[in-house]
Image (cartoon, grey):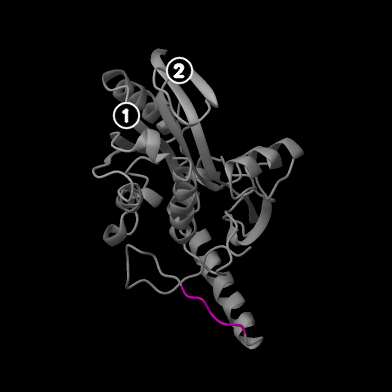
Amino acid sequence: MSRMHGSQITAAEAVTSVGWTAVTTAASVRAGVSRIFLHDLYPDEEGHPLSVAPLPNDDGFADPFDRVGPAAIGALRALMKTFDARYDEGRPCHLLLGGAHPERGGAIYEKPEDLLPVSLAAELASLFPLPTVQVFGHGNPCGLFALEAADEIIARDPRALCVVGAVDSLFDEELLDRLEDDERLKCEGGSPHGISPGEAVGFVLVESTRLSTSRLPLAVVDSVVTGHEPRRRVRLGRRRGVRRDARRVRVHALLLRREDRGAQRVPSGRPDDAQRQERGGMTR
């Protein structure tokens, strides 16, 4: 357990499958709203649709990055509306961004020509001259590590503004393969107790409790606790690539059906492989 030095959360924003903001997400959770559903474009090895929870999306077929990236920028812009020049001008600003481990990949590592941490820092640069950026690629506990780092920054400089966030999507095909090999996915023909892959972004503004601001505290962070989660043993000998092939067939069939109806096709390719055949993503 790490005891904090006097940090408080004074603003929060998020985009999730059940809400476009932190407020609507919290209200949806309290009301029991769920957007988890069986999706034909994400089958398991036996062809059964997986239970998933994507971000809302109006663009038809979109790569996960094309949903998560813009959502992250939108959430940060909403958070920045709480800044007040009377109190915040000239304060050092730090962006501490959590995400998946680099070996697993994820939204914060996609599109090298338009890297998400750089894009988010550019948004902050419209108000702060030299925002610093740190990426915490620790997977599940990434937000806690980033929050602890923010507290250390504030302990050294109580004037610091720390924007702590996390961005992730579990719809990468190779990741879905690994999760299924570990029997961790919830699907119609498999385990009823697995997880439903989803995606979300969220940011909180962390400041010192010793500094006067125009924002009221939402929470005071007393301590951060992390623990070790043993990784389940991967079962060997299972076929790879079956889901990917099945998904491509389903995407192709759905595209043909849309073209037959005269609908406009919205192509999307993997950002890290321009030569890969155009493929679809999630539909609403």
Residue under the image location 47 percent in, 63 percent down: 63
| Image quadrant in which the C terminus is located | bottom right
Q: Which residue is mark 1?
A: 160
Q: Which residue is mark 2?
A: 225
Q: The residue under label 2 is which amino acid type?
A: Val
Q: Is residue 236 magenta?
A: no
Residues in magenta, as a range:
263-267
Q: Is residue 264 magenta?
A: yes
Query: Which numbered disc flags the more N-terminal residue, 2 or 1?
Result: 1
Q: Position of residue 184 (x, y in %)?
A: 56, 40
Q: Position of residue 278 (x, y in %)?
A: 43, 74
Spatial separation of the CA atoms under disc 2 and disc 1: 23 Å
Is residue 255 positioned above or below 218 on the image? below
Q: The residue under label 1 is which amino acid type?
A: Ala
Residue under the image location 61 percent in, 50 percent down: 53
Q: Position of residue 124 (x, y in %)?
A: 34, 47
148 vs 9, nearest the viewer: 9
